[in-house]
Amino acid sequence: MAGNDRSGQPTRAILVFFDTLNRRFLPPYGNDWVHAPNFRRLAERSATFGNCYGGSMPCIPARRELHTGRYNFLHRSWGPLEPFDDSMPRLLGEHGIHSHLATDHQHYVEDGGATYHTRYSTWEFFRGQEGDPWKGQLAEPDIPEAARLQRNALWRQDWINRGHLEREEDHPQSRTFEAGLDFIETNHAQENWFLQIETFDPHEPFYTYKQYKDLYPHAYDGPHLDWPEYKRTTERPQAVEHVRYEYAALLSMCDGSLGRVLDAMDAHGMWDDTMLIVGTDHGFLLGEHGWWGKNIQPWYDENIHTPLFVWDPRTGVRGERRDSLVQTIDLAPTLLEYFGVDRPPDMQGAPLRETTASDAPVREAALFGSFGGHVNVTDGRYVYMRASASADNAPLYEYTLMPTRMRGHVSAKELCEAELDAPFSFTKDCPVLRIPAHGQRNTHHHGSLLFDLEADPRQETPLLDDELELRMARLMAALMRANDAPADQFQRLGLPVAGEIGREHLLVRVQHEAAERAAAALPAEDELPQGRIDPRSPLSTLLAEPAAAAAIEKAVPGLLSNPRLATLGHITLRDLAALAPAVLDAARLRTVAAALAAVP
């Protein structure tokens, strides 16, 4: 049975893991208006990490890192743990450490997350978050007038679920923390256990209760809006402010749940012998950079620069700041080291014991990104976001032995094109399926970007600095090579698999004009020409008019052949530009508007 160097003392650890926790909304990171006293209290009892970054995005790729301690996004998109993966809770179990998961994160019980929760010794799951297919109801739910462009099955199901969550104690978050607290109450006097309390909140939709909303009084007279779509912000400022308050209200509910864990540790005298880690996978854009959400745009600081708090009873560090560069991949090694379990050679993260104790650095640079999107690197000050070198975002392949995606299998048609490929350094000599993939074609649309977070913390002014880009590109290539990234990823980014990175490989200046076009704000409705038919008309109306359809096709060739339009006939061209910027950006929208104005 594993222990650690604290002879005779219990070995226990608790991980409280939130989803979509934006550090800029937390008081320990400088926020002065969000009501979160327990995060303040946590910071007083732990080390607060100021330079923590996510790695593989979004939710389930981040959790693969949480288990394996290595990057996921260069080889595969959203999917299960692989047969060759080293899973931290499973390794703990093999060494006599009982692991327990209490969660409401519905992605664990979908096809793309199906192998994660079963790595724990015991686990509990609570239903009802974000359109979870929970309650069966054939009658249409009662949905208020809402600001929503895409009203799909997920949207409908969420309103069904809300009808069963009218009391706070019924909420999945409440039930998750209650289960975690039950585990603590039952086992606080026992040794050798790891508890992971993981809630989907404050992920959207920002559904919470009156007592939390009342913390943020404000004027708002628009349609229901607590679930912003991943798109450009086209709403009026009052609506953007309202959504931020809705997010803050849910965050305050999370703060209350966190306080219950701190109370339990106080009540049972656990601070002397129990590690506590509090963190998240990523943040959320709430109007910053003109965007809602994540995944479509580059991974800006609000989304990828994450909060992290660590209490390690061996170091006794509390109320102090740590500025060394750390990542999600460090959490598995940290927990294994704490319990005295050897770290497998394929784990690339580092234990944070010495970083917590004295701010000892564990890395020079960190990678982050999502499969097929920008590949990004930071050294803690500068951030380099490298887009695909060509508009087709190719070549791109997924490498996996678990061919599933978020909510379904990889299609039979795709698998017919798959080939068995040679093992990677971390696949335990297992060959893998090589499946053609498409990724995020909008990565090239946004262009490559370079920022100085010290001088420009809001990332409003991209740099044009060839020497700096060259240094960051070399850091990126070195980390990709260390991760045994596929050759097609280097080719997609316009980087050599081996050899020196030179000026001929730089992209920021080459793609600067495209990046500026992508960043340009959409014109307001009153800035567009008005006529009998115009960009404010539903797409179905425009497509029904041969002259209008011809004008659109001439202005933006190929726009009307986009398959996405078949399901979006109720929205306007301006809405389409918000949802699909790579299809219709601000400049093209103006061109189409002028063409429609000329239609008799």
Image (cartoon, grey):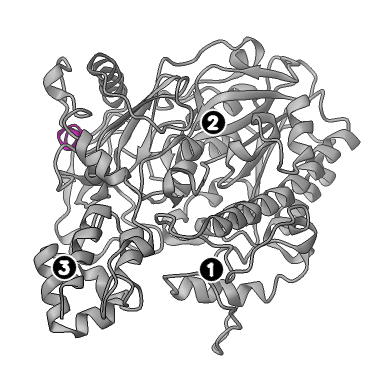
Q: Residues within 10 Å of mark 2 (few under 14, many from 20)?
A: many
Magenta span covers which residues? 487-493
- Of 34 and 189, which appears nearest the observer? 34
Asked if the residue at tag 2 contacts the one at tag 1, i.e. Cβ–Cβ closer than 8 Å, the answer is no
- Which element type, helix, strand or loop, lies under badge 3? helix
Q: Is residue 9 above or below residue 125?
A: above
Disc 3/disc 2 C-alpha distance (Å): 56 Å
With 440 as the anchor, is 273 left or right in this view?
A: right
Name the residue type under label 1.
Answer: Gly
Q: Residues within 10 Å of mark 1 (few under 14, many from 20)?
A: many
Image quadrant in which the N terminus is located: top right
Residue 169 appears in which quarter of the rendering?
A: bottom right
- Of 245 and 68, which appears nearest the observer? 245
Q: Residue furthest bottom?
A: 139
Which disc number belongs to residue 131?
A: 1
Name the residue type under label 3.
Answer: Ala
Q: Check if residue 551 falls in the magenta segment.
A: no
Which residue is label 3 attached to?
595
Name the residue type under label 2.
Answer: Ala
Give the mark nearer the N terminus: 3 vs 2: 2
Which residue is label 2 attached to?
332
Disc 1/disc 2 C-alpha distance (Å): 30 Å
